[in-house]
Image (tube, helix red, strand yellow):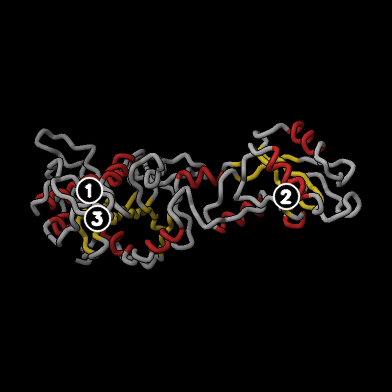
Amino acid sequence: MSPDLPSGGAQTSTTYRKLVPLRTLEEIKAAIQTTDCYIFPTSAKSVNKVLTHLRTSLPQLTPLQHLRRLVKPSFLPPSLLSKISAVATTAAYKFPVLYLLVCPVSDISQSSLESFLLALPISRDSEDWPRISTIPVPSCQPINTVQANEWSERFWPTVYKRGNPYGPHPAIIENAAKKLGRTGEYMALAQAVGLQAVAAGVGKGFGCVVVDPEAGEVVAAAGDGRCKLNSKGWGNPLSHCVMRAVAMVAQKRLEEGVEVMPDNPVQPETGLERKYFHTNPPLPPVSAEDGERVEGGEGYLCHNMHVYLSHEPCVMCAMALLHSRVGVVVFGRRMPKTGALVAESADGNGDGYGLFWRPELNWKFLCWQWVEEDEEEEEEEEEEEGVSV
């Protein structure tokens, strides 16, 4: 069933928006970590002998496979050339010069390295050979060609080896994004169901939509419900839109006769919630992590489903999505103070949670932000200070 937005719900907008994949916490840390390393110039005639002696006599040196080992002076970044000693390629050296990247400074002291090089049974390239300098280089390998080019222009010629050990491979992100063609519809529905919760006086303006990606059907739509009062006049501070949406999926599975643990009844509160709660397209089978169907309540409620959120979820809701084994999450507005999916902080450091892709957690999912085309997303909180989604 296609999303059916009520009049007075989400406003139709001609603003063009785009999907921006989130960077993982490990990707951000890798992008800002550098290591000091030794370099020195040597003539092209003797460089092979120097390399052979380094490999055989000092095997403990840390390999830096994402960095070029030998570089012509003309390929060094101008900022680096201005800091290291200038090389007189014609006067001081009889042959063309190459810069050799040796190792991190933590592997060996500069005095020990210099003594080792001076003791090599090779002819000296110049009177002051070796002219050792210390420079910062990226500690980790780049995650794409763009980053490799940036590092090459800033630090030292860097090689991208078509992989990403710190997050999803770029090809995985690209292929998954091709299946998100109806993002605008689902995001408008998430916004509308959140606005209905406000109008009904049951919650804040946050909305969540759960979609079966194979069928394109909306499985559940939930607004925030923390302002809904019980018989004692108490609200439920844990009744966030994500928690209610996951509970709705569980309730639907119970009604289909699937054993779900635990049994947490949930009641729809608004028109959109009731519409999708009482619409019963066939749900995907309860699955294990490998996608195999399981019985007896041992599987995961939302295995590989897609979730669309008006706002970035809090830690509680992000972990609920992770434990439900969703496959994709798309959200609209960032929540810098309470959000748990964005990994970078305002200054670009990895101070956020980035819970969608953490190596120490037992599940990972892909995550995008839905932002205006060619505009920076404003980092705004909800009107109430510190409100969690």
What is the CA distance from the residue labelled 1 to the residue labelled 3?
Answer: 14 Å
| Residues tagged 1 and 3 counted as in contact (Cβ below 8 A) | no
Q: Is residue 295 left or right of residue 49?
A: left
Total numbered labels: 3
Residue 174 lies in what quarter of the image?
Answer: bottom left
Mark 3 sits on what residue? 210
In this rendering, the answer to whether 54 lies above or below 43 is above
> Is residue 89 visible to us here?
yes
How would you rate the neighbour count of disc 1 (Cα within 10 Å): few for under 14, some for 14-19, many for 20 or more?
A: many
- Give coordinates of residue 194: x percent, y percent: 25, 52
Mark 2 sits on what residue? 79
Mark 1 sits on what residue? 300
- Give coordinates of residue 52: x percent, y percent: 72, 46
Q: Is residue 275 left or right of residue 156?
A: left
What is the CA distance from the residue labelled 2 to the residue labelled 1?
Answer: 53 Å
Q: Is residue 181 left or right of residue 9?
A: right
